[in-house]
Image (tube, rainbow, N blue to C red):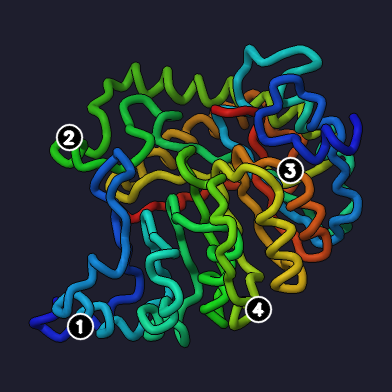
């Protein structure tokens, strides 16, 4: 696609994880000069998916790496991102037009808060008025931090499975919620 | 249910208590509840802890004046021979199973029997029933055809008499 000059037309790229062991991490070392050149050519991305994003390794220059997505991104899907709640929220807050968010965790390192790590406040409070899909979210710090740092949450569609304090998320969207997906148990 | 139980309640409602604490009366814009077909259409799911009865409770708390939809989401494994999710290993398999006419009739009858569950749930609150097949696009219209055949049988049996407007079938293909 790069040779044909089509990368600027790509709207929905996904950085996949090829290892089930969880050892692979998407970090700056994956982006050699050639890959980085291709990465920066993606200037029309609206829906971005990233598996195993290693946010701490991108800090503090994470905005430089993802700057080409900032004006256009509407939907973000993170699978097993590494980092504290505040770092994840900081990453989400890079994208000022973000509407939809998917966040999926396995079981591994999510609770390992990086104590002592100072994360700046998000650059933006994205609208986040679309669909929130979350899987396996432990604790309620993420909700508290999102409400605190983004000034509330305003999703119109919630699809939450195995999320602790799920009804608090639902209540937090009371004024905007239009569609709710319910699950009975851990199926 | 105490506040702490409510706060720590995940979607693992094994005891069912968290569901009973739900009150959606403050969600004035709410107009759609989605639920997986495999969760709600189990005809053997009876009793006070069964999900359909929890769902009825949730439904009864909704005060939103808007016309309301319940969307039953079908995945691949709700249909004979279709995989739930796209995977490379299925690339070489035929996208839809080869079924005899008798098998098709049996599958349609199976769906028809399941449609009695939403009919029961409808007693809690009126809604439009939407059957949505969220299945990867390689399968094509096959699931919709099976659902429509099941609906035709159910309609003939009067199962859908309570629903107005009439139930809708939607195909929501995933990109593979």
Mark whose residue sits in front, 2 or 1: 1
Mark whose residue sits in front, 2 or 4: 4
Q: Mark 3 points at which residue?
A: A165
Q: Nearer the viewer, residue A88 or B119?
A: A88
- Say if A41 sits above or below B52 in the image: below
Q: Name the residue under label 2.
A: B93
Q: What element does badge 3 sit on?
A: loop
Quadrant where the N terminus of chain A sits is bottom left
Residue A51 picture quarter:
bottom left
Residue A160 rendering spot, x and y as whole percentages: 62, 46
Within 10 Å of disc 2 (Cα), the crowding (few <14, some 14-19, many 20+) is few
Which residue is pictured at 33% across the width and 85% down the height?
A43
Which residue is pictured at 56% across the width and 32% down the height?
B37
Q: What element does badge 1 sit on?
A: helix
Q: Name the residue under label 1.
A: A37
Residue A117 rendering spot, x and y as whole percentages: 55, 64
Q: Are marks 4 and 3 on the same chain?
A: yes
* Chain for numbered disc 4: A
Measured Cα–Cα span from mark 1 to mark 4: 29 Å
* Chain for numbered disc 1: A
Q: Are marks 2 and 1 on the same chain?
A: no
Are discs 3 and 2 less than 8 Å apart at CB?
no
Q: What element does badge 4 sit on?
A: loop
* Chain for numbered disc 3: A
């Amino acid at each position: 696609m790069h040779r044909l000059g089509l990368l600027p037309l790509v709207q929905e790229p996904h950085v996949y994880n090829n290892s089930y062991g969880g050892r692979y991490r998407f970090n700056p070392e994956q982006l050699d000069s050639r890959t980085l050149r291709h990465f920066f050519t993606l200037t029309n991305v609206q829906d971005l998916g990233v598996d195993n994003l290693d946010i701490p390794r991108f800090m503090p220059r994470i905005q430089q790496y993802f700057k080409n997505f900032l004006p256009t991104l509407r939907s973000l899907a993170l699978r097993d991102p590494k980092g504290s709640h505040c770092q994840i929220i900081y990453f989400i807050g890079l994208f000022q037009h973000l509407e939809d968010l998917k966040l999926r965790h396995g079981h591994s390192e999510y609770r390992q808060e990086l104590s002592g790590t100072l994360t700046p406040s998000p650059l933006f409070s994205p609208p986040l008025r679309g669909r929130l899909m979350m899987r396996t979210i432990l604790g309620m710090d993420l909700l508290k931090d999102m409400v605190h740092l983004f000034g509330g949450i305003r999703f119109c569609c919630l699809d939450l499975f195995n999320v602790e304090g799920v009804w608090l998320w639902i209540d937090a969207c009371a004024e905007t919620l239009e569609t709710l997906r319910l699950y009975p148990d851990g199926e | 249910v105490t506040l702490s139980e409510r706060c720590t309640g995940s979607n693992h409602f094994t005891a069912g208590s968290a569901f009973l604490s739900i009150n959606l009366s403050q969600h004035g814009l709410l107009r759609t509840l989605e639920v997986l077909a495999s969760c709600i259409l189990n005809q053997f799911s009876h009793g006070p802890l069964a999900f359909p009865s929890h769902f009825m409770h949730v439904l009864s708390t909704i005060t939103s004046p808007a016309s309301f939809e319940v969307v039953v989401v079908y995945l691949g494994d709700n249909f004979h021979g279709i995989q739930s999710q796209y995977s490379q290993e299925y690339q070489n398999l035929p996208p839809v199973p080869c079924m005899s006419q008798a098998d098709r009739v049996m599958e349609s009858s199976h769906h028809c029997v399941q449609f009695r569950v939403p009919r029961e749930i409808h007693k809690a609150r009126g809604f439009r029933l939407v059957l949505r097949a969220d299945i990867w696009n390689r399968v094509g219209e096959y699931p919709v055809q099976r659902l429509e055949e099941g609906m035709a049988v159910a309609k003939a049996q009067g199962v859908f008499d309570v629903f107005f407007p009439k139930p809708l079938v939607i195909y929501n293909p995933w990109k593979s």
